[in-house]
């Protein structure tokens, strides 16, 4: 029969205990010399790097198209791309205007006129490859991204890894399709 403290466990503990004691001694010396802020150590939230804010307040400056707007965020003009929707495009340069592009833009402009206060809610990635801020745009408790889809003026699109608003947009788009609104209206000429 082995004596207590022998074997692998005993060897492990014999090595760890002196290291732990040395670590405690080093912390005591550092605290006594003022090199460690003990109050900060007592607050676990200070152990982590501050997370980026999940939301920002903004004021709408103007609507660019059915899924993009310019907003004033902390005094800076910011181009905001509404996450998880893809609205028909307007004519830009050599890009042709898509079916219901003007209607999607007009809908968003009516919904968020200049001066409207909105909340930008962020997902995992905050900017796209064009430097636009990616966000769910809330006016009050209403997710405007989903409202555009519910009007049938945008389709759901998943910008991985940003999926925070995707389910709400899919549900709204399904409602539009069932009701035959916008892109899903056979009379629109959009192929819906």
Image (spheres, helix red, strand yellow):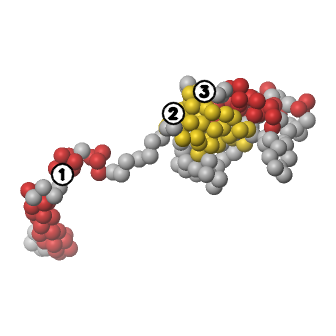
Residue neighbourhood size for the residue with mark 3, other residues' Cα within 10 Å, grouped as few (<14), some (14–19), many (≥20): few
Quadrant of the snapshot with the N terminus: bottom left
Front position among marks 3 and 1: 3
Residue neighbourhood size for the residue with mark 1, other residues' Cα within 10 Å, grouped as few (<14), some (14–19), many (≥20): few
Which of 165/73 is in front?
A: 73
Q: Quadrant of residue 154?
A: top right
Q: Which residue is mark 1?
A: 37
Residue at 16% x, 58% y is 35
Percent x, y of residue 175: 73, 29
Q: Which mark is residue 57?
A: 2
Q: Which residue is mark 3?
A: 115
Residue at 60% x, 26% y is 116
Quadrant of the snapshot with the C terminus: top right
Left or right of 43? Residue 179 is right
Disc on the earlier residue, 3 or 2? 2
Label 2: state its secondary structure.
Answer: strand
Percent x, y of residue 44: 27, 46
Residue at 22% x, 48% y is 40
Disc on the earlier residue, 2 or 1? 1
Q: Which mark is residue 165?
A: none
Front position among marks 2 and 1: 2
Left or right of 164? Residue 147 is right
Disc on the earlier residue, 3 or 1? 1
């Amino acid at each position: 029969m082995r004596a207590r403290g022998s074997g692998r466990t005993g060897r492990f503990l014999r090595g760890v205990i002196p290291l732990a004691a040395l670590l405690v001694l080093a912390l005591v010396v550092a605290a006594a010399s003022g090199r460690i802020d003990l109050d900060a150590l007592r607050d676990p939230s200070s152990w982590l790097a501050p997370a980026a804010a999940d939301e920002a307040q903004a004021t709408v400056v103007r609507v660019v198209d059915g899924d993009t707007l310019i907003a004033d965020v902390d005094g800076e003009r910011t181009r905001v791309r509404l996450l998880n929707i893809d609205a028909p495009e307007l004519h830009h340069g050599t890009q042709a205007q898509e079916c219901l592009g003007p209607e999607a833009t007009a809908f968003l402009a009516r919904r968020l006129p200049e001066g409207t206060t909105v909340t930008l809610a962020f997902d995992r990635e905050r900017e796209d490859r064009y430097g636009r801020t990616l966000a769910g745009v809330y006016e009050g408790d209403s997710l405007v991204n989903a409202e555009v889809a519910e009007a049938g003026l945008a389709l759901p699109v998943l910008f991985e890894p940003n999926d925070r608003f995707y389910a709400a947009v899919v549900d709204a788009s399904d409602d539009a399709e069932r009701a035959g609104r916008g892109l899903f209206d056979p009379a629109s000429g959009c192929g819906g």
